[in-house]
Amino acid sequence: IALNRTKAIPDLHIMRFRSEMVESLVEETRLAAELSRAAADDELLTWYQPIVDLHTFKMVGAEALMRWHSQVRGMVSPAQFIPVAEQSSLILTLGEWILNDACQKLTQTPLTHQQDFRLHVNLSARQVLQSDLVDTIEDTIARTGLSPTKLTLEVTESVLLDQNRETLRKLETLRRQGMHISLDDFGTGYSSLAYLHRLPVDSLKIDQSFIREMRDSASSQAIVRAIIAMAEGVGVEVVAEGVETLEQAEWLRKMGCQMAQGFFFAKPGDIQQLKQMANTPLPLKTHAIKP
Ligand code: C2E
Ligand code: MG
Ligand code: MG
Ligand code: MG
């Protein structure tokens, strides 16, 4: 560091900035190393969040969401560790782990006898790009015995954006076997409603940011309305994400949205909690709105 005071000040800023960068890099590397042991050490968990029909408030599916219960760190959020895993092939290990775990656990619940129930599993872009994607999923289905018609794969818009022929072909192959493809976080990317009908998708999930802003923002309301109308027009189902209030649920139902997921109905929970909810004859909220 220069002794000259006028120079020392900016230099110190740069130094601090650099050391923060190095620290976060070291931290990410450490996290990745711990995470790669997590699967082997039984530290990964699958939680499930119900997806409900907005007319009956009954469960029609559930999304599998990964949790990491680290001995050292406690509960780590996927928002923290999935982006780290996505930087390497680690996401492939984690992705295969949850697909297998969720399919296996689901075959043991009464939910699989329910005709319209679907298990949603997230696929990261790197997984979709693997040449053996179809084989991996087919193997899991064969091994666990879950019917392919009970499985929905959630992908983000970016996966389909480049219209990669190979990707489209893989998704079509999976759909022919009865699986559904759902576009996750819809509206946050470069989604063009105009080409929705040309994509191999069965449903889309409106990102929770729009649902959150609906109450105070006329433009968010207009966007949600447009997404629902367009999806209906091209025969794509709609799930609203992040529904936290009855008001939001009612508004969405009136707009023609069929399904929703969010804390208002249920927070993500373990397989036992999911089974319990499945066994309750009542809708998820007893004060169900009148259709
Ligand atoms: P996502 O796929 O969009 O999942 C929905 C997220 O919204 C979940 O967060 C869920 O807990 C949260 N959520 C649901 N309802 C509400 C609500 O009413 N209010 C609020 N504030 N949040 C709500 P979670 O479990 O923390 O997961 C975050 C993200 O991490 C997921 O977003 C997904 O992108 C990723 N992720 C989680 N599990 C997996 C996985 O197994 N594989 C991959 N590739 N990504 C995963
Ligand atoms: Mg998802
Ligand atoms: Mg989502
Ligand atoms: Mg999201």
Image (spheres, helix red, strand yellow):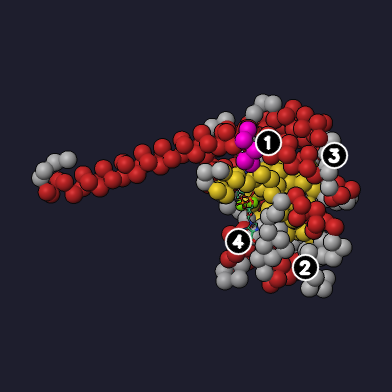
Mark 2 or mark 4: which comes first in sequence? 4
Quarter holding residue 15: top left
Q: Which residue is mark 1?
A: 97
Say which of marks 2 and 3 sits in front: 2
* Closest to the observer, 282 or 121: 282
Give the distance between the C-alpha atoms of the residues marked 2 and 3, in whole angstroms: 29 Å
Mark 3 near mark 1, Cβ–Cβ under 8 Å?
no
User: For numbered disc 3, what is the local secondary structure?
Assistant: loop
Q: Amino acid at mark 2?
A: Lys
Callout 3: 10 Å neighbours few (<14), some, many (20+)? some
Mark 2 or mark 3: which comes first in sequence? 3
User: For numbered disc 1, what is the local secondary structure?
Assistant: helix
Q: Which residue is mark 3?
A: 147
Percent x, y of residue 122: 67, 43
Give the distance between the C-alpha atoms of the residues marked 3 and 4, in whole angstroms: 33 Å
User: What's the magenta region?
Assistant: 40-44
Give the distance between the C-alpha atoms of the residues marked 2 and 4, in whole angstroms: 23 Å
The residue under the point 60% across, 64% down is 212
Q: Which mark is residue 210?
A: 4
Q: Which residue is mark 2?
A: 285
User: For numbered disc 2, what is the local secondary structure?
Assistant: loop
Q: Is residue 112 magenta?
A: no
Say which of marks 3 and 1 sits in front: 1
Mark 1 near mark 2, Cβ–Cβ under 8 Å?
no
Please say whether residue 178 is visible from this viewpoint. no
Give the distance between the C-alpha atoms of the residues marked 3 and 1, in whole angstroms: 18 Å
